[in-house]
Amino acid sequence: MVAITPVAVSGYVVHAGFLGKQPIFADGSGGVVRGTTAERAEVHGGAILAATATLDGKALITSGDDGKVMRTEAAGAPRLVAERPRKWIDQLATGPNGAIAFASGRSTWALDGRGTAFELTRPRAVGGLAFLPKGFRVAIAGYNGVGLWFPGTVAPPQELEWKGAHIGVTVSPDGRSVVSSMQENALHGWRLADGQHMRMSGYPTKVRSMSWSVKGRFLVTSGAGVAIAWPFHFKDGPMGKRPLELGGRQELVTRVAAHPAEEIAVLGYEDGMILLVRLSDGEEVLLRRPGEGPISALGWSPDGLELAFGTEAGEAGVVDLSA
């Protein structure tokens, strides 16, 4: 049996996760809730548009329609990281050594660990950001592909080209593959060693959530009535290989989150249900019955024994798997 502790939030849950052992949630009304007793901090003067934890797990970085990027730790007052007045900062990523990248429109900014800022203007609006796992390099999704940018250098970004609008991006944990989600209900990947293209299609809707399994063996994705997990542990990645299809239901999978240590993943559905699924054989465990609104956020505790979740309708909670 699993136990669920509800958490009071205000509106659409943008982020659900942990800072160490402490659950933390960010909601669309501009607040961050720490713990399960709803210790709330009003962090933004408007809506929170994006949120992600730092790689060391010590802080939550948020950005909003007030033009601010904020840092909230497990205790203490939130503090300002950067501000771009009159900008809607809707793209955000954290990287190695305390790096942060954020974007609004065609502009991307990257901050190194010392807080030095660098700016890049792209030809079209930025659709997604992700750091490569080593060094200070940012993948920027947009129209007709993904640019790989070394902030602070004079070299132009390396362009990974594929026709169409790219609305999200992720990088494999080993740094060998870049994968984007596209407006046309597909994924597209590039193998950086030789530029080999990897096309992953067949989705009925856009892929809004992607999560790498432990050691990067599989890329688990939303966007269908099952979670589709593409194998990346072969020489040619997923090309010519059938993906795993996990947790099949009538409802669409809206969010996915791979476990930090085991080859299992949680799947959140359009009706608010949450399933735990083992990748090796598809074995399922029900973690939450359907509720109000689609699952919009999922995040594991570092030890993998607790799961934070949130919905578009403003429900949130913590699932204890150790019971």
Image: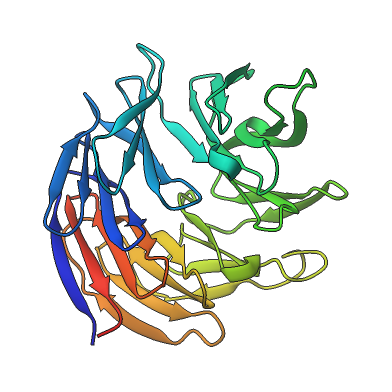
Count the marks.
0
Q: Image point 25% across, 28% down: which residue?
A: 44
x, y percent for residue 199: 70, 53
Q: Is the C terminus in the top left, top right, bottom left or bottom right quadrant?
A: bottom left
**Quadrant location of the N terminus in the rendered image:** bottom left
Identify the residue at horizontal 64%, vertical 35% (top origin).
138
Q: Position of residue 178 (x, y in %)?
A: 69, 48
Q: Is residue 180 visible?
A: yes
Rendered image quadrant of residue 256: bottom left
Quarter residue 130 falls in: top right
Point out residue 144 in the picture as x, y percentages from the top left corner. 68, 31
Which residue lies at the image location 43% right of the left edge and 79% below the top edge? 277
Percent position of residue 127, x then y: 53, 33
The residue sitting at the top extreme is 86
User: 6 or 240: nearer the eye?
Assistant: 6
Left-right relation of 206 to 294? right
Q: Which sits in the foreground, 234 or 240?
A: 234
Q: Locate residue 107: give its quadrant.
A: top right
Q: Is residue 319 above or below residue 317?
A: below
Classify 155 as above or below 101: above
> Does residue 183 appear anywhere in the picture?
no
In the rendered view, how is the structure colored? rainbow
The answer to whether 76 is drawn above or below residue 281 in the figure is: above
Given the current orientation, which residue lies at the most extreme right position?
Answer: 194
